[in-house]
Amino acid sequence: MNFNTTELSGYLQIFWHFSWLEWIVFSLIINVFLYLFSIGLYLFIEKTCPKSRLQEKNHPITSSDFYLSILTIACNCLVLLLGVFLWKNGWIEVGNKESAVWIVSEVVALLLLMDLLMYFFHYAAHIPFVYTLLHGKHHEHISTNYLSLFVLHPLETIGFGVMMLVLLICYPFSVVSISIYLLLNLIWGTIGHLNREFFPAKFDRYWIGTTRFHNQHHLDGSKNFGFYTSIWDRLFGTYK
């Protein structure tokens, strides 16, 4: 595929000329920062949120969970580098829409489409042999802690990333929209794995994937496979 670099905005021109070593370093810095941001956000909410606990105690922090969370960072770096490769070779194009309305529309589209894809991916992860091989480790966290979001099998992490890359191949989302979505994804994942309810109870009626919604999934792995919303669980009969 041919790609005209003159169409790139100034900051994208800078990234376009990064060497692969610079991309590796950049990817590590970004992903370590987001990892620490998630942990910091979790601990801040734990100390300041007045809501009651969903379960009596947080899941204990173990060395194996810590090492697996570091492996998750490495997998996220790999996904970012794969995205760069696809971008540099013309498979992923970046949109240049900058109006607030358009950006909000793209972010909402990403949230709903990724929520649908993750629903099916998550549902498939609970097929018995797949669950034993991939997803069981995450569900050892019946109660949760600040590492629970990152306690994933490497294939799960890469699978989530590949789904995102497929959407980016199909449509030229803007960098701003992608960045906002990824930040919301991290915040939502962190809040979803709290051990105390973050949202008012009435939010359930708005089909939002609240902390309680995902906590129910950790208690009952046959329900609540959605991530940002409960839309797909309600439609497909897996809502609790």
Image: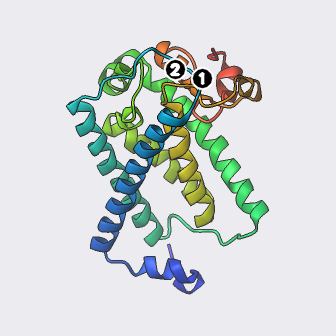
Q: Position of residue 65 (x, y in %)?
A: 27, 32
Name the image quarter holding residue 207: top right
Residue at image position (63%, 14%) is: 240
229 in relation to 180, above or below: above
Q: Position of residue 83 (x, y in %)?
A: 44, 60
Residue 115 picture quarter: top right
Colour pattern: rainbow
Question: Against 69, is 18 above or below?
Answer: below
- Report the residue at 38% width, 44% height from top: 158
**Contact, mark 2 vs mark 1 (Cβ under 8 Å):** no
SS class, disc 1: helix
Please state the horizontal and vertical placement of residue 5, each as a whole percent of the image: 52, 83
x 51%, y 24%: residue:
123
Labels 2 and 1: the sequence-earlier one: 2
**Label 2 neighbour load within 10 Å: few <14, some 14-19, many 20+:** some
Mark 2 or mark 1, which is nearer to you?
Answer: 2
Task: Please indicate, yes or no, whether residue 16 appears anywhere in the rendered image.
Answer: yes
- Three-letter residue code for mark 1: Phe
Circle 2 SS class: loop
Left or right relative to 240: residue 185: left
Observer-nearest of 108 and 56: 56
* Tag of residue 117: none
Judge whether 75 appears above or below 49 on screen: below
Q: Position of residue 185 (x, y in %)?
A: 54, 45
130 or 70: nearer the viewer:
70
Q: Tell me which amino acid carries mark 2.
A: Arg
Residue 53: image tag? 2
Report the label total.
2
Q: Which residue is mark 1?
A: 213
225 relative to 55, above or below: below
Q: Residue furthest left?
A: 63
